[in-house]
Image: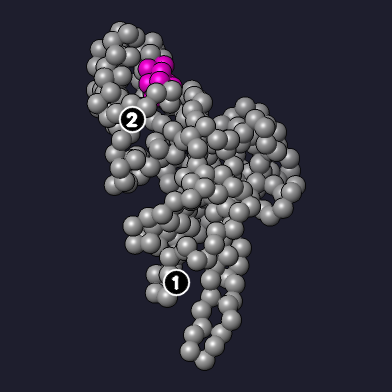
């Protein structure tokens, strides 16, 4: 069973509505929330417990699932992107300094920093030579606390030093399309093999993959900051047409609430209009 209520940035989630912390199963926090501290409550001879202090960092619907012991904020589809630790994003290099690349995550936010050694296999002698305008698929490593702190990105898993999941690092070639942060989240849930109803309702990438499999397929990277990078394996006019078709499908899906059947019809219509035989 789950309950919902509206929260704004800075609101504290009342401990009275949180799932019980009596069991050994930890409370899971989704995006839009942060744990401030483990607040100790008054202890008696018969009872001793502690309640987590959780604060909302984004506006949206607070969803609490007591069965799964999870708390999350369901944000609005067209909200501006607010960096959250572990988010996968597409960033653009603006400039470089001695130890960092300074990257644009959103047009109206301060530049994020990406360490020049935060790439798989990078060293002082083999650090990547990224130029202004280059795109990277990165993970948000930290967001800091308080005003003026920088968002830090990485292109490796800090625990392993590997580019996990596959695709972190420089994005060469291809095209980038802007979509809403809401659609970006839905696409990422669909690609993660989630069994949720929301993930099952997004079939457009699966359908496009089937249509273009015989033509070499395509690569795609979805960023939580509302960016989608697409690169086709083919070459020439057909590769350009396929890239444009994918972009058009995503744009139209973003503008309209389409069922899975309507998404498949959309793919067929766009391919027909662009004269793509698939």
The residue where tag 1 is placed is 21
How packed is label 1: few (under 14 Cα within 10 Å), some, or many (20 or more)? some
Q: Which mark is residue 252?
A: none
Q: In the image, is 199 to the left or to the right of 76?
A: left
Residue with the most extreme bottom position: 45
Q: Tell me if residue 71 is in the magenta stretch.
A: no
Residue 130 can be seen in this image: no
- Which residues are the magenta region? 244-253
Q: Residue at x 39, y 74 (%)?
A: 23
**Residue 8 image point, x, y percent:** 59, 47
Residue, disc 2: 205
> Of callouts 2 and 1, which one flags the residue occurring earlier in the amino acid sequence?
1
Using residue 258 as the reference point, say whether residue 74 is left or right of it: right
Callout 2: SS: helix
92 vs 99: above or below: above
Q: Residue at x 63, y 52 (%)?
A: 10
Taking the spot 30% from the left edge, 25% from the top edge, the residue there is: 263
Horizontal and vertical percent for residue 218?
A: 36, 27
Q: Which corner quadrant of the image does residue 248 belong to?
A: top left
The colour scheme used to paint the residues is one colour
**Label 1 element class:** loop
| In this view, the mark in front (2 or 1) | 1
Report the quarter where the N terminus lies.
Answer: bottom left
Measured as percent of width and height from the top left, residue 114 is found at: 63, 44
Q: Is 194 drawn above or below residue 2 in the view shown?
A: above
């Amino acid at each position: 069973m789950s309950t919902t209520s509206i929260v704004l940035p800075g609101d504290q989630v009342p401990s009275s509505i949180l799932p019980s912390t009596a069991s050994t199963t930890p409370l899971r926090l989704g995006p839009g929330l942060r744990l401030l501290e483990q607040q100790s409550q008054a202890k008696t001879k018969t009872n001793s417990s502690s309640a987590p202090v959780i604060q909302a960092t984004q506006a949206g619907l607070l969803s609490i699932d007591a069965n799964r012991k999870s708390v999350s904020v369901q944000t609005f589809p067209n909200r501006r992107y607010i960096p959250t630790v572990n988010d996968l994003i597409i960033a653009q290099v603006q400039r470089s300094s001695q130890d960092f690349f300074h990257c644009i995550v959103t047009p109206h936010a301060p530049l994020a920093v990406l360490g020049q050694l935060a790439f798989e296999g990078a060293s002082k002698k083999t650090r990547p030579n990224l130029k202004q305008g280059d795109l990277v698929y990165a993970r948000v490593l930290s967001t800091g606390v308080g005003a003026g702190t920088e968002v830090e990105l990485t292109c490796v898993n800090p625990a392993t030093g590997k580019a996990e999941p596959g695709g972190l690092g420089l994005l060469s070639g291809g095209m980038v399309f802007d979509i809403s942060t809401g659609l970006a989240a839905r696409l990422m849930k669909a690609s993660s093999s989630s069994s949720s109803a929301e993930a099952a309702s997004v079939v457009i990438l699966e359908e496009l993959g089937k249509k273009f499999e015989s033509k070499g397929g395509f690569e795609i990277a979805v960023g939580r900051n509302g960016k989608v990078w697409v690169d086709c394996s083919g070459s020439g006019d057909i590769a350009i047409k396929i890239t444009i078709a994918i972009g058009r499908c995503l744009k139209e899906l973003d503008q309209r609430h389409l069922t899975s059947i309507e998404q498949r019809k959309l793919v067929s219509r766009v391919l027909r209009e662009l004269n793509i035989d698939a």
